[in-house]
Image (cartoon, rainbow, N blue to C red):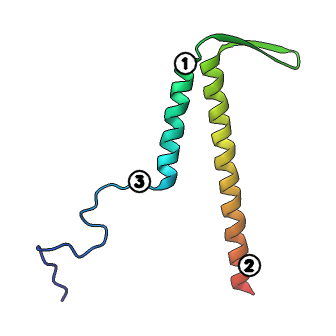
């Protein structure tokens, strides 16, 4: 029978609270800098692409560009993990 004491902390993670990793801190700093940049750049710009022309606020263009970049970054990570997983499975079969 396993007895759990109500006294001291035996687990390594107990009592530490919420801890953020380096990647989470970097992401929060990046989002903060992006928000500051968006608030400082509110003028309207005209974008020309092929035969289309758009007039958008610069903050909106910045947000859309950041979201597209984040989706590409996330997608590349998913592809990388999938390739590593299939390679590990192939190694186990051999």
Q: Residues within 10 Å of mark 1 (few under 14, many from 20)?
A: few
Considering depth in this image, is 84 or 42 the residue closer to the camera?
A: 42
Identify residue for label 2.
90
Q: Residue at x 52, y 52 (%)?
A: 23
**Residue 73 image offset from top left, x and y in percent:** 67, 47
Identify residue for label 1.
40
Numbered label attached to residue 92: none
Q: Residue at x 66, y 55 (%)?
A: 77
User: Which numbered disc flags the more N-terminal residue, 1 or 2?
Assistant: 1
Q: State which quarter of the image contains the N terminus.
A: bottom left
Identify residue for label 3.
20
Dot 3 falls on a residue whose secondary structure is: loop
Q: CA distance from mark 1 to mark 2?
A: 51 Å
Q: Residue at x 27, y 73 (%)?
A: 11
Q: Quadrant of residue 50?
A: top right
Q: Residues within 10 Å of mark 2 (few under 14, many from 20)?
A: few
Q: Look at discs 3 and 2 and give the one toward the viewer.
A: 3
Considering depth in this image, is 33 or 82 the residue closer to the camera?
A: 33
Horizontal placement of 21 versus 69: left or right? left
Q: Are the two marked residues, 3 and 1, in contact with CB atoms closer than 8 angstroms?
A: no
The image shows residue 17, relative to residue 91, as above or below, that is above
Q: Look at discs 1 and 2 and give the one toward the viewer.
A: 1
Q: Residue at x 52, y 46 (%)?
A: 26
**Residue 5 image offset from top left, x and y in percent:** 13, 78
């Amino acid at each position: 029978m396993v007895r759990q004491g109500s006294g001291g902390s035996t687990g390594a993670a107990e009592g530490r609270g919420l801890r953020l990793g380096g990647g989470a801190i970097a992401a929060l700093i990046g989002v903060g800098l992006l928000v500051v940049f968006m608030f400082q750049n509110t003028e309207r710009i005209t974008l020309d692409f092929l035969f289309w022309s758009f007039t958008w606020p610069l903050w909106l263009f910045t947000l859309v560009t950041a979201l597209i970049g984040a989706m590409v970054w996330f997608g590349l990570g998913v592809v990388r993990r999938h390739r590593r997983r299939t390679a590990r499975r192939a190694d186990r079969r051999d």
